[in-house]
């Protein structure tokens, strides 16, 4: 029964980034259908990410106070509706609003899934479970453009219809798997903001959330601008070579999230996080001196390994700092890290245009050092 519950959580966590990231393969089709430019199409990413980051700040707390199972069920319904509306869109404006609905729906699902995983696992195997969760999320990120590109050959609208149907199936599986599981809390809507404030100021949650923000802020900046930098002189790699390089970090994330989770259980949460930050520091320093396809491929793979270890550590810690308020901690932590994802391209664009890719590498290396320092200070009351 536990395996069925875990599968329901991993499938549900896979679906959100699957749809969110699929847009990268659909840019030419959407430009043609809506007579839009690339900038307008790429607006669909922040239209998904900002509601996703903002609403999940509250969804975990709502699940703490009311019911986790019902919160996830409603979230999947909204997500499915948003996906179908994306496929039915007749204008760019309707498509963008539908993408916002997608993000809002999955915001009710994502942090609550993490909290439920914390509820049903023991301390001894929680790291492994969180590692599998990280692998599921990374698999969604990596396979979204691939699946979308395949289905777009039939028609880009079928991408969103297929993902909507998949979300309905995941919702039904989740509802059935947790049919006899109670997640009900106590309180009312008036308790939501006070509980978020309390959690944010207790148990090192602020520093944990800051680390989550900085990790995505750094990683997405590298991924966002490396593709452009590698296509320009003096490196001038071909498009497929750049694609292989960028996908290598995702492949590493899928594989090593599982190893990272096992390492969390074996050597501890903090030590695994410090190892992860140390691993990411290596490629962020060596990128500056790389000048070949193979060098960048290996370094991006290593960056993916380090990031996988960091997420396995931080996700596990987020479930243990305040066990009685897991939903709220999950909301605050995940909202913070995905906010870093959303604002990274916006903030780093002028930095990249003025100072070049080396400034992006330097910023990422500095963030890795900050992460190691924070974990070394024992601010987080976790071994």
Image (tube, rainbow, N blue to C red):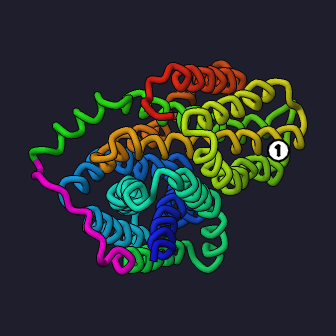
Above/below status of 7 relative to 126: below
Residue 52 lies in the magenta-colored region: no
Which one is nearer the viewer's eye here, 320 or 49?
Answer: 320
The spot of residue 36 in percent (x, y) is 50, 55
Q: Residue at x 85, y 25 (%)?
A: 289
Q: Which residues are magenta?
A: 175-189
Q: Is residue 21 visible?
A: no
Res 184 → quadrant: bottom left
Residue 160 on image: x %, y %: 48, 72
Q: Residue at x 42, y 27 (%)?
A: 207
Frontmost residue, 236 versus 280: 280
Q: Identify residue for label 1.
A: 297
Q: In terms of image quadrants, where is residue 119?
A: bottom left
> Where's the N terminus, which quadrant?
bottom left
Residue 121 in view (yes/no): yes
| Left or right placement of residue 348 versus residue 86 in this view | right
Total marks drawn?
1
Left-right relation of 134 to 64? right
Report the magenta stretch's main SS.
Answer: loop
Q: Position of residue 245 (x, y in %)?
A: 78, 47
Closest to the observer, 162 or 157: 162
Q: Position of residue 121 (x, y in %)?
A: 45, 59
SS under mark 1 = helix
176 is within the stretch colored magenta: yes
Name the residue located 41 percent from the left edge and 79 percent from the top edge: 173
Horizontal side of residue 369 vs 279, given as left or right: left
Q: Looking at the picture, does residue 83 appear above or below residue 37?
A: below
Estimate how packed mark 1 is, as few (under 14), some (14 to 19) or many (20 or more) residues with alpha carbons within 10 Å.
many
Q: Which residue is located at x 55 percent, y 33 percent?
A: 270
């Amino acid at each position: 029964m536990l395996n069925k519950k875990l599968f329901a959580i991993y499938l549900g966590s896979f679906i959100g980034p699957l749809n969110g990231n699929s847009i990268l393969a659909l840019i030419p089709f959407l430009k043609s259908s809506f007579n839009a430019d690339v900038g307008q199409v790429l607006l669909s990413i922040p239209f998904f990410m900002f509601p996703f980051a903002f609403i999940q700040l509250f969804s975990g707390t709502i699940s703490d106070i009311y019911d986790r199972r019902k919160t996830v069920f409603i979230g999947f319904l909204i997500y499915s509706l948003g996906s179908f509306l994306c496929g039915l869109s007749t204008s760019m404006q309707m498509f963008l609003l539908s993408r916002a609905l997608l993000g809002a729906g999955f915001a009710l699902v994502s942090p609550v899934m993490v909290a439920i995983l914390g509820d049903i696992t023991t301390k001894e195997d929680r790291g492994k479970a969180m590692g599998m969760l990280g692998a599921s999320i990374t698999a969604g990120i990596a396979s979204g453009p691939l699946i979308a590109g395949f289905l777009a050959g039939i028609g880009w609208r079928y991408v969103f219809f297929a993902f909507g149907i998949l979300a309905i199936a995941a919702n039904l599986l989740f509802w059935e798997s947790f049919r006899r599981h109670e997640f009900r809390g106590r309180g009312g809507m008036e308790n939501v903001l006070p509980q978020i404030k309390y959690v944010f100021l207790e148990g090192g949650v602020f520093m944990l959330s800051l680390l989550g923000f900085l990790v995505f802020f750094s990683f997405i900046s590298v991924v966002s601008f490396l593709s452009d930098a590698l296509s320009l002189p003096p490196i001038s790699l071909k498009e497929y070579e750049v694609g292989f390089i960028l996908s290598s970090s995702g492949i590493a994330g899928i594989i090593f999230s599982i190893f990272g989770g096992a390492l969390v259980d074996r050597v501890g949460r903090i030590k695994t996080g410090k190892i992860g930050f140390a691993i990411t520091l290596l490629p962020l320093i060596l990128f500056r001196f790389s000048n070949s396809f193979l060098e960048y491929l290996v370094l991006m793979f290593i960056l993916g390994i380090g990031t996988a270890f960091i997420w396995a550590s931080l996700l596990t810690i987020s479930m243990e700092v305040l066990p009685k308020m897991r939903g709220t901690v999950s909301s605050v932590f995940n909202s913070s890290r995905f906010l870093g994802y959303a604002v990274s391209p916006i903030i780093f664009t002028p930095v990249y245009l003025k100072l070049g890719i080396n400034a992006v590498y330097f910023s990422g290396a500095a963030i890795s050092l900050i992460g190691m320092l924070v974990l070394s200070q024992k601010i987080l009351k976790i071994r």
